[in-house]
Amino acid sequence: MKEPDWPTEAWQRAVVDRHRRFATACLVGAGLIYFATQFVEQPGFWVLLLRSGAEAGLIGGIADWFAVTALFRRPMGLPIPHTAILPRNKARLGEGLGRFVARNFLAPEVVESRMRESEPALRLAVWLQDEVNARLVADRCLALAPDVLKAFDDAEVRGFYAETFQGQVQRLDLLPLVERVLRIVVDGGHHQKLFDRSVRIAQQMLLQNRETVYRRVEERSSWWIPRRFDRRLAEAIIQGVEEWLGEIAADDHPARWELDRAAVELIDRLPASQRLRGRLDALRDEMLASAELRQVLESAWQDLRGGLLQEVESEDGTLRQALAASMQQFGATLEADPAARQRLDERLIRLLREIVLPFRDRIGHFIAAVVSDWDGETLADRLEIAVGRDLQFIRINGTLVGALVGIALFLLTQALF
């Protein structure tokens, strides 16, 4: 996942200039040797050999200099035909380059093969496990969050409530929802737990209010009945109620069966109960129209937005740390699961096949358009710094090879004639 270390333009330009100077030095050296040997009045074998090599090297170096220079510009500014080839044919060059990239680099079989060989899911898994990389992903994910949150003001929230939330809820039929909730309660036996809880609360309230029962019995008793009889009557009532509560608390008491039957019947009647539907709709509309609900929603939004802003803007916030940790955990899980990596690779290949590859011709046209928009000097300059180093080797080789050929021809001539 490491980014390639592409050479900078300044470094490429320095390399091309260095090799150009060396190639020019070879050409100048050959020229100096050739002209220097002309001043020898009675040249011998070795002087003539050196002169022949320098002459051939000078010719070869000039020819290759002309050929290389003619690719990018007019040599010495002279209007020589078939020079400045690349700037004058930039449109055709752009079309050819775009077509070459689209047909060769973006061919489906080539792209899919390279994707499978590179195992992008495994590379992603290893890369994410690095804490620095995981933190980088978390930072990028949260970079736009403050701007997004701040883009919503209170007026927009109220408008959302009025236009979207309130409208959607008003169209909601609550009766099926109530029916579903009640069925879940009954199917899960939660109504029996509620029944048990109610019995226990009744028993506790009876024990806590014994004196109240005594007092109420005495208040309603006739004046001529002795008080001790009132108390015995109250105790009998309390004891009877306690025994009854204990009986219905048993799991097999008929009251529980009656509760089940009544609950099922109630749920079955709900869909046809227009009266209940009307009550639920009225209750819903009353709640939506209440100022209290609006205040609650606005207050909740303010608290939520403030908390989120504080989290996403904090360099060491819990949300940022949790997101980075999640990225690391995802990387570890992905690395340990070959099946998951294979599925992710297949999805990436499918995504590339469905999104990128169908537009490869357009990508080629885009490359052609970019090249065509460059001016001639810019095109020549960029191409020269990209491949100029190798072209300067052509000049160097032309001078050296020319010199060797000149020497070989001189020796062959001497041997034959």
Image (spheres, rainbow, N blue to C red):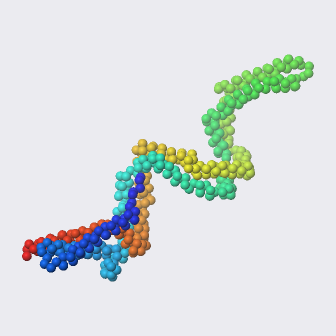
Residue nearer the viewer, 308 or 180: 308
Residue nearer the viewer, 19 or 374: 19
Q: Is residue 409 visible?
A: no
Relative height, residue 81 to residue 299 (above, below): below
From the viewer's perspective, is 259 left or right of 97? right
Picture quadrant of residue 276: top right
User: What percent of the width, then of the height, locates residue 120?
Assistant: 41, 51
Q: Is residue 404 visible?
A: yes
Residue nearer the viewer, 359 or 335: 335
User: What percent of the width, then of the height, locates residue 286?
Assistant: 74, 49
User: What percent of the width, then of the height, locates residue 4?
Assistant: 39, 57
The residue drawn where x is 69% and y is 26% is 248
Relative height, residue 244 to residue 310 (above, below): above
Q: Residue furthest right?
A: 224
Picture quadrant of residue 167: bottom right
Residue nearer the viewer, 210 or 73: 73
The residue drawn where x is 23% and y is 71% is 399
* Count of numbered circles on the image: 0
Quadrant location, the C terminus: bottom left
Q: Residue furthest bottom?
A: 79
The residue drawn where x is 47% and y is 49% is 132
From the viewer's perspective, is 389 left or right of 348? left
The residue drawn where x is 21% and y is 69% is 401
User: What percent of the width, then of the height, locates residue 124?
Assistant: 43, 50
